[in-house]
Image: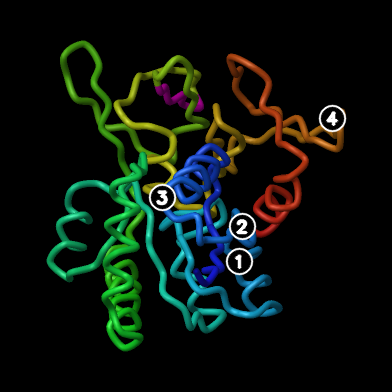
């Protein structure tokens, strides 16, 4: 059985581990060459290495929408997209006959996508990738307002008024610059896809932070960074060593 060389482009470590485990189970002929967590890292890899046989690509990455990769480097292999998109976008994918994996990814869906790929010619999957890239560009609008439920009412909150988002025990909260907390019925993974990546950064599994909310950054133990905001936070915001470079680039360039 020929080995299929694959790269995973995904900024959620848990999602990478899950996909690797599924591929090992359902497609042992697949060899995962690497996992990349940003547009910048993906462009650098694809420019300096042979093209893989297949790419699993998250639609939203920490430093921007994944279609930005295709603006900077030619991808000549099939792409299977992963997404936590809302229903409107999923319907658009279906209309365009575009396959995707909806998170959380299930083994049966990976099998379906790989089987579909085997049935496509090079021309077929090339056209499919082009369709989804155009679709992403056409529908790529960032949220300016979020609706939150408060005391049996839906209250609009301007994204520019939000200092950070925080999750704990499957509950997601947003906190304004006035230090007001509101519960929001969305995961951080869904939110990061709706927010302008020049304004918000996924600091770690617990926090998405606003560029405007940052007060200072402190060098922390183990080559990590401690981020202090202009409003109190329920726990320390630590940037891992692996994400320090990405964070610094976002902090300077937005």
Mark closest to the chain's N terminus, 3 or 1 = 3
Mark closest to the chain's N terminus, 4 or 2 = 2
Residue to which mark 3 is pinned: 26
Residue drawn at point x = 64 percent, y = 80 percent: 50
Residue to which mark 2 is pinned: 36
Give the class, few, some or many, for how many residues have Cα within 10 Å of label 1's Cα (few <14, many ≥20).
many
**Which element is circle 4 on?**
strand
**Which element is circle 1 on?**
helix
- Disc 4 vs disc 1: which is toward the camera? 1
**Which element is circle 2 on?**
strand
**Image location of residue 251, percent across then percent down:** 68, 50
Magenta segment boundaries in residue numbering: 172-177
- Disc 3 vs disc 1: which is toward the camera? 3
**Image location of residue 48, percent across then percent down:** 71, 78
- How far apart are the alpha carbons under marks 2 and 3? 22 Å
2 and 1 marks in contact (CB < 8 Å): yes
Numbered mark located on residue 42 in the image: 1
- How far apart are the alpha carbons under marks 2 and 1? 6 Å
Mark closest to the chain's N terminus, 2 or 3 = 3
Left-right relation of 175 to 119: right
- How far apart are the alpha carbons under marks 4 and 1? 27 Å
Numbered mark located on residue 231 in the image: none
Q: Nearer the viewer, residue 215 or 241?
A: 241
Left-right relation of 162 to 63: left
**Image location of residue 232, percent across then percent down:** 61, 17
- Disc 4 vs disc 3: which is toward the camera? 3
4 and 3 marks in contact (CB < 8 Å): no
């Amino acid at each position: 059985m020929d080995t299929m060389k694959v790269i995973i482009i995904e900024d959620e470590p848990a999602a990478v581990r899950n996909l690797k485990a599924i591929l090992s189970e359902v497609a042992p002929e697949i060899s995962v060459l690497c996992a990349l967590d940003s547009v910048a890292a993906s462009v650098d890899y694809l420019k300096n290495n042979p093209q893989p046989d297949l790419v699993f690509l998250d639609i939203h990455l920490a430093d921007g929408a994944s279609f930005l990769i295709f603006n900077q480097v030619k991808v000549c292999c099939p792409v299977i997209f992963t997404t936590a998109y809302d229903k409107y976008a999923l319907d658009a994918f279906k209309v365009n006959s575009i396959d995707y994996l909806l998170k959380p990814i299930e083994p049966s869906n990976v099998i379906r996508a790989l089987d579909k790929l085997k049935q496509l010619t090079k021309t077929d999957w090339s056209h499919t990738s082009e369709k989804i890239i155009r679709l992403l560009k056409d529908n790529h609008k960032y949220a300016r307002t979020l609706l939150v439920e408060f005391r049996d009412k839906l209250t609009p909150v301007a994204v520019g008024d939000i200092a950070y988002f925080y999750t704990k025990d499957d509950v997601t909260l947003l906190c304004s610059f006035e230090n007001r907390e509101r519960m929001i019925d969305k995961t951080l993974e869904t939110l990061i896809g709706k927010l302008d990546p020049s304004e918000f950064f996924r600091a770690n599994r617990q926090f998405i932070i606003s560029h405007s909310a940052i007060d200072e950054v402190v060098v922390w133990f183990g080559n990590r960074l401690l981020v202090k905001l202009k409003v109190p936070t329920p726990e320390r915001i630590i940037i891992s060593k692996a994400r320090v470079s990405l964070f610094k680039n976002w902090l300077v360039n937005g």
